[in-house]
Every structure is written in structure tokens, then in C-alpha cells.
Amino acid sequence: MSGIGLGAASGAGRTERTAQASAAAGPSISTVPTPRAELSLAGWLPLSAGLRASVPLLLVLLFGFVAPLLTVLAYSFATPRSYDVFSSFTLDNYAAIVAPGNTVWTSFAWSILLAVLTVVVLAIVAYPIAVGLVRVFGRWSGFISILFVFPLFVSENVRLYGWVLFFIRNGVLDGGLKALGFSGGPEVLYTPGVILFGMAYVYLPFMLFPLVLGLSMVPRDLVDAARDLGAGRWMIWREIELPLAMPGILIGMLLSFVLGAGALAESKILGGQAIITVTHDIETAFTYAQNWPLGSALAVLLMVVVSGLSLVVMARLDLDRILGRK
């Protein structure tokens, strides 16, 4: 036992002397290599992880959307009937558009009027169909939706020329009525009415499916509760269904209006030269007239007018109440 105690005391003494020597020698230098700091994207690009992940999409938008718009804007200030983009600056193109003798304002008026009428017609036509797809058709809703989507797989021009063959003299409508003993069909081709019909036909899916999305956001339990409390059908629609479905309705109207304001094929194929829209003037400036600066100025004004009207309408709506934020 005494030997064990002496050994333990001797070991403790050696440990104490070693600790004192280490303290006297100062801090030790570790021989384990320290890993170098790795280079990271956050080191030179101080962005959040989500924003860094969206860089590819932002690049696509930059080169596919922003860059063409900036090019058109630059061309609108170029010398008329030239290609001196980014090397000249003039307001002659805009001055030519607003000149007293220029009637291009009628093209703008027709484009905006047809776009507004298209929105109104589509809202009246598409709303009952959307209600049926959400609440009535049941298991047939998917099949009926495919029927509305299927025409989008066919070229717009092909579909419009099909309506030309339907409405033209001795065509499907006129020839069919004559075969039944009537005097013939009405003269509807190359009129403003048939242009509006063509626009409503082409842009129907762009109004219908946002409406379906908006109506599907209305809880049926809320409607049933309002009915149990004595609310009538009109009150339920006005106070519950319409406000809750308004986001989808607004999206459909905005899409239809923007597409209608830029419509070209409908006015050319179905309307002929009965109505000249602003998009027709833009196409003429870029092709036959070879006046790219004037066409760019018209395009810029069209974008300003359409976006301005859209913002005015959106500003007059209480979006917080529509979206249920208050």
C-alpha cells in the first residue's frame, strides 16, 4: 500500500512540474492544420438564398423581356426612317403621331373600345360557364374544360379563317340557309361586330379559367351559412361570392383587356379593312413603310395607354378588401 501511495505521489509531482513548465513556456502552438475559409457566392454577392436561386429566371426576364422593351423605347427616339438606334435622339416620331392631320388616334380609340367590349362580353359569357364548371357539371367538368382548352392547340389564324369560311357568302351559314329555302345568311363578315365576336372567341379561355379559379375560392360552408341565416340569392352573390371571387375575375379581365388591346389577326382576317386598329398601324410601320422609329413610338404609346388604364382601374378597387386582408 505504501508503494502504491509513493507511486501516485511521484506521478502527481511529475504532472504538476509538467504543467508549470508549460505555463512558463507560454501558449502552445497547435500542429493541427486549420481549414481554409471556403469561397462562397455570398462572399461577393450579398443576396439571400432565395434571390440567388432566382438569378436564372431574372436573367431570362432581363434578356427576353426588359431588353426588347428598352430597344423599342430607344428606337422610338431615333431619326425617322433610319436605324440610328442609340446614336440619335429626336421627338419627331411622337410629334408626327400627335400632329393635327394624323388620324392615328382613331386607331387607338378602336383598339381600346374593342378591348373593353371584349372584356364585357367575356364576363357575361364566361361567368355562367365558370359557375357550371365549379358547382354544376361535377365529374364532367374536366371533359368540358378540355373542350375549351383544345382550340388553343390550333393556330389562331387557322381558326379565324375557319370562321371566314363559315360567314362568307355561299359559305357554310349562307349556303346552309339557302339549302333550307331561306334567302341567305346575314352580311356579318368584315364588320365591327364580327371582329368583336372573333376576339371574344379567341380570348374566352383567358377569361374563363381565372374565373373558375376565383369561384373555387368561395367556401360552400359560408354560402350555406348565409342561406340558413335568411340571406337571399342576390345578397349571397353580392356580399359573399362576388367579393371572394374577385381576384380571379380581375385577373381574367386584365388578361382579356391587354390581349384585346393588342389584337391584330381578328381585325385583319375577320374585319378586312373595315376597322384599322393601332396594332395594324404598328405592323404597317415596321413592314411596308420601313419606318421602325415610328412603329416603335406607336408601340410605346400603346403600352403606356394600356398600362395606364389598367393602373387607373386597379387603383379604384379596394384590393385589400377583395383579397380578404381586412
Image: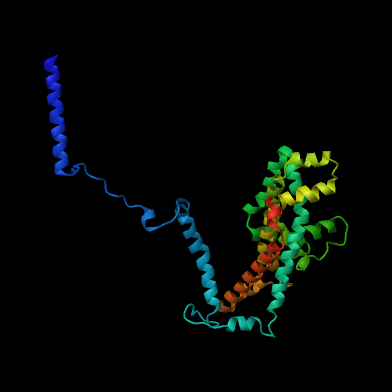
Residue 186 position, x and y percent, is 83, 63
Closer to us: 156 or 204: 204
> At 63% across and 74% down in the image, what residue appears?
301
Q: Is residue 77 above or below residue 269?
A: below
User: What colour-coding does the image apply?
Assistant: rainbow
Closer to us: 181 or 160: 160
Residue 119 makes an appearance in the image: yes
Residue 2 position, x and y percent, is 12, 15
Which quadrant holds the N terminus?
top left
> At 12% across and 20% down in the image, what residue appears?
6
Query: Total number of numbered labels?
Result: 0
Residue 121 position, x and y percent, is 77, 59
> At 15% across and 37% down in the image, what residue appears?
20
Residue 290 makes an appearance in the image: no
Q: Residue furthest top?
A: 1
Residue 170 position, x and y percent, is 78, 62
Closer to us: 37 or 297: 37
Q: In this view, does 41 lie above or below 14?
A: below
> At 80% across and 42% down in the image, what residue appears?
226
Q: In this view, does 222 lie above or below 116?
A: above
